[in-house]
Image (tube, grey):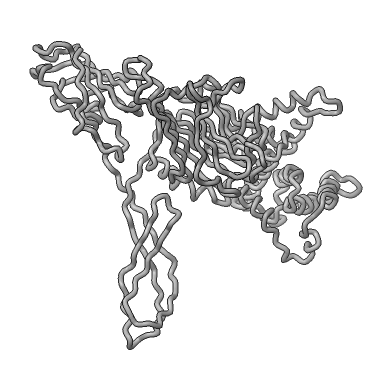
Amino acid sequence: MIRIKRKDHLRLDVATCEPTVATLVVPNRPDGLLMAGDILEVEFEAATNQPRVSTKDDIDAILDFPIDIGDQLEGTWITLKVLRIRILTITTDVWVANITQVPAVKLRPEVLHPRHFRATGISYRIAVPGVYAWRLVIPDAPSQLELDSSHLEISADCAPATVIYVVESTRNEARSWPPPPVIQVRGTVALDGSHALHLPDTSVPHTPSWSLLFWIYLSQDSTGSHRTLFYKGPGHNQHRTPSAWLQPHDRRLILRVSTPDNMDVGITTTSELPLHEWVLLSFTFDNTSAVSLNGSKDDRNKTFSYVYAINGKVDTEMNVHHSVVLPNSGGLYVGGNPWMDGVRGFMQNVRLYAAALTTSQIQTVFRQEYGRLLSSATVAGQLSAIHRDQRHIPVSDQTMTSLMQPLDEPALAELLRMGEAYLYGTDTTPNTTLAAWYFKQALRAGEAAAAKPLALIYALDRHTQGVVDSTTCSGLAQYLWTGEAVALYHYAASMGDVSSMTILGRRYEKGDGVDMDAETAAFYYYHAAAEASRAYHVRGNQPLYRQSHSILMDVE
């Protein structure tokens, strides 16, 4: 076989994020012609997403050969980097000796998507004559956006003048879509600091490049101890490729991998994780030390990159040079791990990709999902509202002024006891409306134990929420009360309520009030069953009965 190496002038701009061809292997017949049955191998410098290559049209769509190598071709991916092409038929004479260049990778056609921006009309009073223009700046966009208005002249004859101006623009932007994830947990995972989302090693992409993406809402500040954001490893040794922990005294991340010389190689991120805010976190891993083209182990010129971004903006990039980064066979634990405390809050739409996503692809995900995520009709939006209500308690209702002062434990316990009394009829006639009122005040004052009984009331009696009258329930109102009940179950689960985990497992399994998702259901069922098993032999505990009873109340 003859190996043709890439020439430097054929390298593509890395900003295009397209793989480049490293070598082309052709038949070892320098004085002969290409024939039907011949095999050519194309080796790329980086892992690809393995596009379709079953026909000549497929191959021509991604590769530009300097010479036509056949009329009918059949391609097969041997690895993520190696494409094998078999010539089925060829009617032209192509001398092997004339193939002196590797094919170039064709750039994906850029599709422009219009985005329309319009600022709200604002009144300005201008007292000084002159020429003015307005600039609309959106600094928090993934790529900073600035829109300029046309110029406006205020003459000395009409100053001062009042001007109402609207900045409006349509802008075309290229949008790069990521490939489908290899595994996805679509629902909202409640994290209580003790239970983690576990993805076995067989579910993690075993490719040199891969990515981890998820939305997260952190509800707990620094605790003085390390907490796990995610961990890949078996737990009984020092392997940790890749992992990330929160620092003890701030919310910056510690990014870590393992090498033969140092099992704890890493860096600390530039920015802290926001508190009480939904953000999209992405971690991309590109390990060129995992394999070499001929399968041999060579530590020279090896690089492992670990890129961390918040909302599509790169925050920290770590590179390990001239050393093999060690993989491991341990599972991937997200939100915590069995051997260390995890974070408290919520994760949503956890995804693994078998490629290192580009910044453009991550920004596309952020733009597409951010607006809907914060809607009041979603679990994420409802959870944000619950936490916001706890941090900013209004006291406009004078009848509640005394209750809304900072409450000590006895006062919180009294609110909770009154709610239970009206719910179950202890010492008084059952009244779910009053029960919900007491539970809601207890929850707003910080009593987490009020979340589940309040959710049960909302799930059973829609009139207690005040979103409908006593005789009717509109479709929108019914959707809202169902959503708030589901959000409260998530909140209770994030505070360690196991029976709420059981309820959420059933809801995600059946698609009851949430989008059906087996992965999310399995998370809740697994931890509920594990906790029930641990408590089974504790005297006086009947965890399975209590969980079953809660499910029955939720579905009645």
Residue 221 in the image: x percent, y percent?
64, 46
Whether residue 412 is visible to the viewer of this picture, yes or no, is: yes
Q: Is residue 95 left or right of residue 341?
A: left
The residue positioned farthest toward the bottom in the image shown:
157
**Residue 291 quadrant:** top left
* Residue depicted at x 31% and y 84%: 155
Q: Nearer the viewer, residue 300 or 446?
A: 300
Q: Is residue 297 above or below residue 253?
A: above
The image shows a total of numbered marks equal to: 0
Q: Nearer the viewer, residue 527 or 510?
A: 527
* Residue depicted at x 59% and y 20%: 237
Residue 106 in the image: x percent, y percent?
23, 34
Q: Is residue 480 above or below residue 508?
A: below
Whether residue 422 is visible to the viewer of this picture, yes or no, is: no
* Residue depicted at x 25% and y 30%: 62
Residue 166 in the image: x percent, y percent?
39, 68
* Residue depicted at x 16% and y 16%: 89
**Residue 509 quadrant:** top right
The residue positioned farthest toward the right in the image shown:
427
